[in-house]
Amino acid sequence: MTAKLIDGTAIAKKVREQAAADVTEMVAQGYASPGLATVLVGENPASEVYVGMKQRMCKQLGMESFSYTLPTDSSQEEVEALVRKLNADLKVNGILVQLPLPKHLDDEAVLRTISVEKDVDGFHPINMGRLAQKGREPLFVPCTPDGCIYLLDEVGVELRGANAVVLGRSNIVGMPAALLLVKRDATVTICHSRTKNLSEVCRQADVLIAAVGQIEMVKKDWVKPGAAVIDVGTHRIEDATKEKGYYLTGDVAFDEVKEVAGWISPSPGGVGPMTIAMLMRNTVRAAKIANGLIKV
Ligand code: NDP
C-alpha cells in the first residue's frame, strides 16, 4: 500500500485564506483589524525565527502585529507586567508568549497571566481545563494539536470510535491532541517515555499522532496497514551534501511508513504550516469574541 499524502501546506493555505477573508469582512464592517502581540524574552535564534514568521503572516493576512522583546535577564514581574499591559490594550486581541522562556522564569505563571479571552495559543490553564472537561469548550485550542485534527478532518478520516494513539504527553502537543481526540469520540491511548511495548501499542492505532521529538522513531512495523499517521516532529539534521547544509525530518520514518499507512502527513509540509495557520485563525476568533461577533 502507498499512503495518500495529507498536504499540510495546501490545507494551511486554505485556512489562512479564510482568516484573511474574515479580516477583510470585519474591516469592511467598520471593526479594527485583529491584532496579535508577540512577546519574546531573550535571544533564542529558533524563537526569533518563529516570532518573525508569525509577525509576517499577520501582515500578509491584513492583521496588526505588535512585537515586544525583553532582555534575557528580565524578572518574572517584568514579563508579567508586560502581559498585563497587553491584556488591557484594546488593539491587542491575541497574546503569544514565545516558549521556551529563559530557565529562571516560571512559564506556567506567565501563561496564567494572559487573559483567557486573548489566549490564542490555548495554553492558559482555564482553556486547557475546559478542553479536558466533558460538555465544556475552551475559548481557544492549542494550535499544533488543533492543526492535527484539522488535517484528519480535511481528508475525511473517521475519528468517532477510532483507536487513536498519541505518542507524547507534552502540554503543548501530546496531551491536548489526546483530549481533542477524546472530545471527538476516539478511544485514546497516550504513550510516553515509560510506555512498554511502544511499537505494539502503536500498531493498534487507526489514527497515530507522533509528537515525541525523536528522529524518525516510528517505523513501518509500528503502523497498522491503512492507519492515518500525523507526524508532528520537526528535526533539523546537518548534512553538508544538501544545498542549505541541512535537511528537515520528523518523528516518523516517512519513506517506509508511507508503504503501510493509509494516510500520512509528512514533516516538513504537514503539521508545521498548520500551526501558524491555526494561530491566525485563533487571532481572528479572539477579535470576533472581543467585538461580540461570536458569543462564548
Ligand atoms: P516534548 O519534549 O515536550 O515532549 C515529548 C514527549 O515524548 C514526552 O511526553 C516524552 O515522554 C515523550 N518521549 C520522548 N522520548 C520518547 C521515547 N523514546 N519513547 C516514548 N516517548 C518518548 O516535545 P513537544 O511535545 O514539545 O514536541 C514534540 C515534537 O513535535 C518535537 O519534534 C517538536 O519539535 C515538534 N513540534 C512541532 C510543532 C509544529 O508546529 N510542527 C510544534 C511543537 C512541537 P515523557 O513525558 O515521559 O518525558
Image (spheres, grey):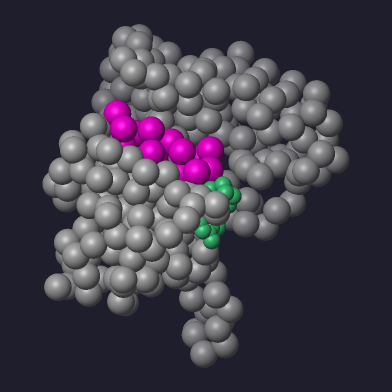
Q: Is residue 125 above or below residue 194?
A: above
Q: Report the residue at 76% width, 44% height from top.
A: 102
| 67 or 196, nearer to the observer | 196
Residue at 38 percent across and 63 percent down: it is 199
Image position of 10 (left or right of 137)? left
Q: Is residue 139 visible?
A: no
Q: Is residue 258 above or below residue 56?
A: below
Residue sticking out furthest to the front: 196
Q: The C terminus appears in which quarter of the rendering?
A: top left
Quarter in which the N terminus is drawn: bottom left
Q: Position of residue 69 (x, y in %)?
A: 71, 40
Which of 240/222 is in front? 222
The foreground one among 170 and 165 is: 165
Range of the magenta residues?
169-183
* Left or right of residue 106: residue 259: left
Q: Residue at x 40, y 55 (%)?
A: 210
Asked which quadrant contains residue 150, the reply is top left
Q: Quadrant of residue 153?
A: top left
The correct choice, above or below, for 272 with respect to 39 in the image is below
Secondary structure mostly seen in magenta is helix
Q: Residue furthest bottom?
A: 241
Residue 181 included in the magenta stretch of the image: yes
x, y percent for residue 247: 49, 76
Residue 116 in magenta stretch: no
Position of residue 32 measured from the top left corner of the image (x, y, whole percent): 42, 21
User: Is residue 294 in view?
Assistant: yes
Q: How many marks?
A: 0
Q: Residue at x 35, y 60 (%)?
A: 200
Q: Position of residue 29 (x, y in %)?
A: 28, 17
